[in-house]
Amino acid sequence: MSLIRIDVAAGSRSYPVLVGPDLAGRLKSHLDDLGFPAHRVVVSSPHVWRLHGDRAASALAGRTPVLVRDGERSKHLRTVSRIYDGLIAAAADRGSGIVAIGGGVIGDMAGFAAATYLRGIAVAHVPTTLLAQVDSAIGGKTGVNLPQGKNLVGAFHQPAAVLVDPSFLATLSGREFRAGLYEVLKYAMASSLSLFEHLQKNADTIARHRHAAALLPVIEQCCRIKAGIVTEDEREQGVRRVLNFGHTAGHAFEAVTRYARFRHGEAVAWGMLVACHLAHLRGRLDPGDRDAFGRLLFGVGTLPTIGDLRTSDVLDAIGRDKKVVEGRLNFVLPVGIGRVEIVQDVTTDELRAALVAAGCINS
Ligand SMILES: NC(=O)c1ccc[n+]([C@@H]2O[C@H](COP(=O)([O-])OP(=O)(O)OC[C@H]3O[C@@H](n4cnc5c(N)ncnc54)[C@H](O)[C@@H]3O)[C@@H](O)[C@H]2O)c1
Ligand SMILES: [Zn+2]
């Protein structure tokens, strides 16, 4: 299978996203070809490195990797500090580059370290979870959590390259894989009827077998959508906001359950259902399209239950979301399959009705 190259032309930097099934074993030659700095520091996690370090070793350029823990609970400034220690120990200077090999947490932390170390050095992302491959590795958002909330500290720092190899995904747990698949459904419902139809036919095979041949076209299409959107709107002032479909309610579900019950994608899955019901209640989405989305979503697998959450907690958390601008609640709502609109006038009563209709609260 040949290598696919997708270019991101963001205002601050242009860079390639390479997608191919045997990238992992040839990281050095790809990075060399792309002119990535020869002085490289790999940042990964013990878990990812145990599974894939042998194959990815060519990225090391003779150095030991900086291994820091991943998972949401490790995504804080102390871990970033350990990455700085590793950079200093490797004598990294302004001409050095970080190669981040891991899921979205490693990518966000290593990206933030790259944005800030010596006021900014190069980073290449090698994403190893489905979520990171289709979403977080592209677009330059980096950052960490504070005890007060998620992603409260960060920077925009576009990578120099993104190398996507679906064969990493073979070792993901079923749950992590499905969590990423919900973000794939997000792209389909928010911006691609053809992807939606493709998933209607193939989601089951993709989720069960994860064959590179079935995964590659789906990952490629998501990367193309994200690359196109980031090219148009690097700093999320316009069209990039459509990628927040499902995230207004989704973030609230994560926060109310203290990030312990849902994987991010699972909370977004419930959030997308809420948005579909909301759109339908406002007369903007055909019930047939709403139900087609629901069937596709539940066809992927069962989601952690949600109906026990307290209505007031959920409504308060939605009200605190970053997407509240000047007191008005921003919502990305589908108006058909592959099309969304952004509305700013959702009332609490409408929201409550949609939460009930989606089965997220009782009344
Ligand atoms: N920067 C952005 O634009 C952006 C977009 C979406 C999400 N994010 C961030 O991404 C993070 C979530 O990323 P995630 O879901 O990848 O989580 P993660 O990085 O914590 O990875 C999840 C788990 O999968 C393991 N793992 C990683 N690769 C593996 C592999 N190939 N095989 C087996 N296990 C593997 C990790 O060790 C970890 O335990 C969140 O912090 C979120 O805020 C950022
Ligand atoms: Zn997301």
Image (cartoon, helix red, strand yellow):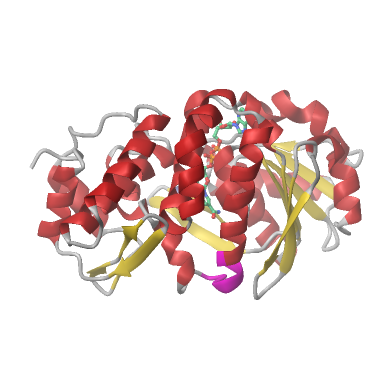
Q: Residue 290: x and y, percent?
A: 28, 48
Question: Image point 70% across, 24% down: which residue?
Answer: 51
Q: In this view of the protein, which residue sits in the foreground, 4 or 163?
A: 4
Q: In the rendered view of the protein, which quadrant contains the C terminus?
A: top left
Q: Residue at x 48, y 36 (%)?
A: 201
Query: Which percent across, then down, holds residue 214?
Result: 62, 35
> On screen, 200 above or below 173?
below
Q: Which residues are magenta?
A: 229-235
User: Can you give x and y, in whole percent of width and height, for residue 90 in the image?
Assistant: 84, 46
Residue 55 magenta: no
Q: Is residue 294 found left or right of 114 in the rendered image?
A: left
- For residue 104, side relative to residue 87 (left or right): left
Q: Is residue 240 above or below residue 256?
A: below
Asked if residue 234 is among those painted magenta in the image, a careful observer would answer yes
Q: Is residue 61 left or right of residue 52?
A: right
Would you say residue 262 is visible in this rendering?
A: yes
Which x, y percent locates residue 44? 70, 38
Q: Nearer the viewer, residue 228 or 72?
A: 228
| Of the pair 150 and 225, the residue shown nearer to us | 225
Q: In the rendered image, which quarter is residue 293 located in?
A: top left
For the image, the number of numbered tags is: 0
Q: Residue at image x 47%, y 70%? A: 239
Visible in this render: residue 39? no
